[in-house]
Amino acid sequence: MVNYVLAAAARHQATAMLAELETHTPGAAQRLARSAFTELQTWPELTVDLVPETQTGSRCSVAGAYDFGPPALISVADAASPARRDFTALHELGHHFQKHSLDLMEAFESQSDGGLQLEDAACDAFAAEILLPTPLVDHHLDATGPTADTVADLWRAGAASRMAVCVRAVQRLPAPGHILLLDGSGRIAFAASHGLRPLRRGSFQGDIPVIDRARSSGRGRAQGRTQVRYRDGILGRELHAQTAPMGGYLVAVLVTDSAPWRRFTPPTKDTGPQAGDYLCAHCDEEYRSFDPACSACRVPHCPECGRCSCTPRVNEHLCPGCFIKHPPAMFADGSDRCLDCS
Amino acid sequence: MNPAQSSAYERLVAAAAGLKVPDAVREVATAPPRDPEPSQIWRAVWDDTIQLLVITAVADDTVQAVPVSFERYADTDTLLLPAGASTLEQPLALWWGLQLSLPWYVLDRQISQLTLPLPASTGLTRPHEVPPGATWGSTTPHPTAAAAEYRAVLADGLAELSGAQWVPHGSGVLPELLQRRGITIKQLASQLNLQPPHALAVWRGQAPLAPEQAENLAAVLGLGTDEVLAANPALPAPVIHELGRPSRRPQVRALATRTATSEPDARRRAAFGIYALAARQEGTTTDWSARADRYFELHLR
């Protein structure tokens, strides 16, 4: 769960990092905003490499990495979008500053995890602040918070990636919620969350009510209430949602209350995550489950018989006495009835 | 070439040039190493010990394996497999009763694959049924003493491989010790004369203390040096597993060459490097495999 204290601490840390950047290399922030990757390649203390995205295998879950060395090394996945590549390069530069400044490290000492989460969140905030300076963000996102249209406007106004814009906009949400970037198939290309459990990249949201309407309308615009989908079909609480097109993608702003596009938005009922419904293929039990699904059949284990939907490895026989399927060990040689019935 | 005038190495190269390596062996031996599977024949290597093995079972971090040799020595407990029993196309001797559990990280390269199913049990007891064409060895024509000595050598080699270790054993409570004494990152850097990034990694429990550093810190903490060393970081199990995969071995070896260290030292260096690597990652679960990819990409450029 993202907490508000951490988000505030990350923004505070990012401000200190920007001051450190200005002391380190005066005027660098503007050059980094124009092209972070190109600028960083000129820094003698850093070795910055572009790694083909295919080199990271099918997982491709690590967009960038930083090793403090010496020498300090940064690798950035060769993403399709130069803007996304720059955001990642700036995120890694954030690690470089935080790991080399004993003053910046002081913020970690009050964190229960040694500041691991704070360091990462501050890197995002630092990158977003460079790519989308506060005056530009203030100009597009007013005090009521971001709408789907103002998020898209902010993206068009700057040189930042859609991802950076989502990170910056989620900081301005007036209530717990998400800003989602969805591709044409309705899958999450990027998700920034605030006060709610984060959503997984790649998860399909294309058929949840508001997103579905936005996609089927052909214009990418819709608003209303919906629940987002977590792992294995588990649904989150109901949220107020609004969508807008954003350069071939769909941006969706979802909040629990205080939706900036409405005059008055009461909080939605906190129904919490709702488990998926399943029908057991073996014992016909109808059940709901939060358990992780089997990786093969995508169905969690039935609480009644303990099985998922996979075909059993053991060849079972139906006993005509008790009408229960048993493994071969339950039958004496030559007998068609199980040991319990014979 | 006149053998009398050539070196042993030259004679070996000349002999090797005359060998016909079966296509299946060449294919599997030159392919990128993959995770082990039962019935595969592997070369296992650790320090100076080299041994051919048949994998009989695979668990998360270990395999059960039986030593295998080309049929020169045999005893009554050796299962002799015909040439058609593996893609090596050579008769093989399977040394029954020597099965041991070995860590994945001693597996060096797969060289072949059995084409016949082994008996279900490869333990101490000899099975009643053997694969088609296989027979149990006898004391003749080879002298018993030589076969017994060969079995003993194999047993020793397998014990060496089974006992191979590289994983540091720390309880991981070092950060707790430092924080309980109120030692800040700045103080730690000053006390141990560490660069800030390294001081942060030690303070977070992502980098181990060397014995001399532990001795230095022990006085500050009011503890014994051994107690401080015992509090060193514990590596996450998925990192240990990832570095034990045969596909990582060429990378670990390349790192060892580059850093002029031993293979176990390079493995420990990589493990803590992967653990402390700052990686921008999608999803909520740490993808240690992708992080390991990135670590080696950074360090083997």
Image: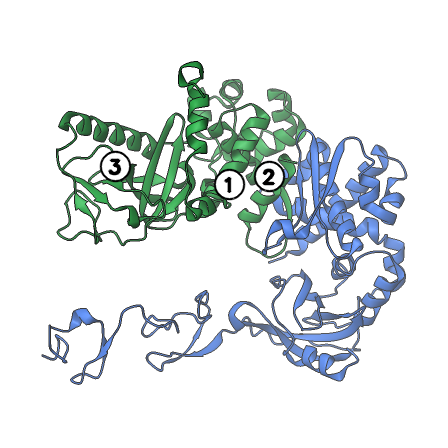
Chain colours: A blue, B green
Q: Quadrant of the N terminus of chain B?
A: top left
What amino acid type is highlighted by mark number 2? Phe
Q: Secondary structure at mark 2?
A: helix
- The answer to whether residue A196 is left or right of residue A24 is left
Tell me if mark 1 has few (under 14), some (14-19) or many (20+) residues whose alpha carbon lies within 10 angstroms of its own.
Answer: many
Q: Gap between marks 1 and 3, in whole Å? A: 32 Å
> To which chain does the residue with label 1 belong?
B
Q: CA distance from mark 3 to mark 2?
A: 40 Å
Amino acid type assigned to the residue bearing label 1 in the image: Arg
Spot the residue most to the front.
B2
Q: Amino acid at mark 3?
A: Glu
**Dots 1, 2 in contact, CB < 8 A:** yes
Which one is earlier in the sequence, the residue at label 3 or at label 2?
3
Q: Give the mark nearer the N terminus: 1 vs 3.
A: 3
Q: State the CA–CA distance, disc 1 to disc 2.
A: 9 Å
Dot label at residue B296: 2
Mark closer to the observer (1, 3): 3
Q: Is any atom of residue A278 visible in this view?
A: yes
Tag 3 residue: B71
* Residue A309 screen position, x and y as percent: 39, 74
Residue A143 is situated, as x and y percent measured from the top left of the image, at: 83, 64
Which residue occupies the foreground of this view, A296 or A203? A296
Q: Position of residue B223 (x, y in %)?
A: 45, 22
Residue located 56% across and 74% down the image? A271
**Residue that protrudes farthest toward the top in the picture:** B5
Name the chain under label 2. B
Please tell me whether mark 1 sits on a helix, a strand or a loop: helix
Is any atom of residue B205 visible in this view? no
Write down the residue under mark 1. Answer: B248
